[in-house]
Image (spheres, helix red, strand yellow):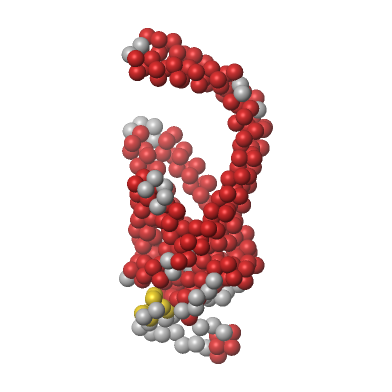
Amino acid sequence: MKFRHSLTVLIDNFSLTYKQLVYKLVIALITAGLTVAIVYPFLNALTSLEEFKNLLESIKTFFNNLLEGKLDADLKISEKIKAAIESIGTLIEENSGVIALGITGLIFVRLVNMFFSSIGNYAAAAVINDKMALRAQSPFLITLIKNLKNACLYSLMYVPLSFLYDAICVIAMYFFIFKALTFVPMLIQIFMFLTAIVFLITLKLTLASDWLPALIRGRKKHGEAFLYTFGRKNKKTFNVLSNFVVLVLIIFAVNVFAVVFTFGVGALITIPASYIILSCFQFVNYYDREELKYFVDKNTIIKPEKEHVQTREEFFRGDE
């Protein structure tokens, strides 16, 4: 039921997808420029090395001989390739400080990208909430400006935690599956790695599912919303987790289909829509659990069996 309601809310707010697309494209252009500024000097220095040029030439000759069936020549060339790789490895070790600085810069760019994306997700979530609660057609840009302070505070809390969680999970799973389980066939290792990553993503989404709704709909302070989302009492965690598993798998399948079968054009719609439907599910789940009525479209109101009665404090606070 929650999944069906979330899909209906997504359709009802589908125009928001295009606004998110424009917003994310602007962020992507900015971060791409910063990434090029950091990576280009290193790549330019690397490609100008004689060892790198020899490596490329050896690889080209190797594949040409392979296609022509000259296996004896390939054995000699493979030794040259190995020697060139070792030379480049030595150069990288000698310049490890510069490389570490470059990696730090890329991490910073990634955090900047996540920060501004998170602000956009907050604004989109606020627009969705206005539609669900009041059928209000809130403009995305005005909502973004109006909620900029709260969105920035939310992003400053969420982004470092999310980045740290993702980094730890990916590194831990990589060493556990590809290094510790070397006796397992490669295809099974890849399957295990992807399965673990999908589960860990859904676990993060489950734990943080109430954060935005508690801030926007619940009007809690940032510290209260943070503690509220990680408290799992009476939140039907397994049910939420199972729904997120289905959502993440569908999102993954749809985006892969869009990239492969539309040459990436369809991904311009499916990627921003993926963020929207995750927000839709978060709010549907929150409204259902808090026993609040909400619109899924202009003709349908979902009412809980036991509707929440507004207190005097909530009335004067302006809670709907």
**Depicted 317 relative to depicted 18: above or below:** below
Give the image location of residue 202, x and y in percent.
42, 56
Identify whether 78 is placed above or below 38.
above
Q: Nearer the viewer, residue 240 or 215?
A: 215
Judged left or right of residue 26, residue 200 is left
Camera sees residue 256 = no
Taking the image as shown, residue 115 lies to the left or right of residue 257, namely: right
Q: Count the marks: how many?
A: 0
* Residue 267 in view of the camera: yes
For residue 286, above or below residue 307: above
Q: Of 20 and 118, which appears nearest the observer? A: 20
Q: Quadrant of the N terminus?
A: bottom left
Which residue lies at the image location 37% right of the left edge and 38% below the top edge?
189
Residue at point 61% right, 50% down?
A: 30
Residue at 49% in and 78% down: 136
Residues 25 and 274: in front is 25
Seen from the viewer's position, the closer of residues 59 and 64 is 64
Q: Residue furthest bottom?
A: 312
**Residue 220's x, y, as percent?**
57, 74
Residue 288's place in the image compared with 148, above or below, is below
State the residue at coordinates (34%, 58%): 246
Image position, residue 292 (x, y; %):
43, 80
Please provide percent x and percent y for residue 118: 56, 59
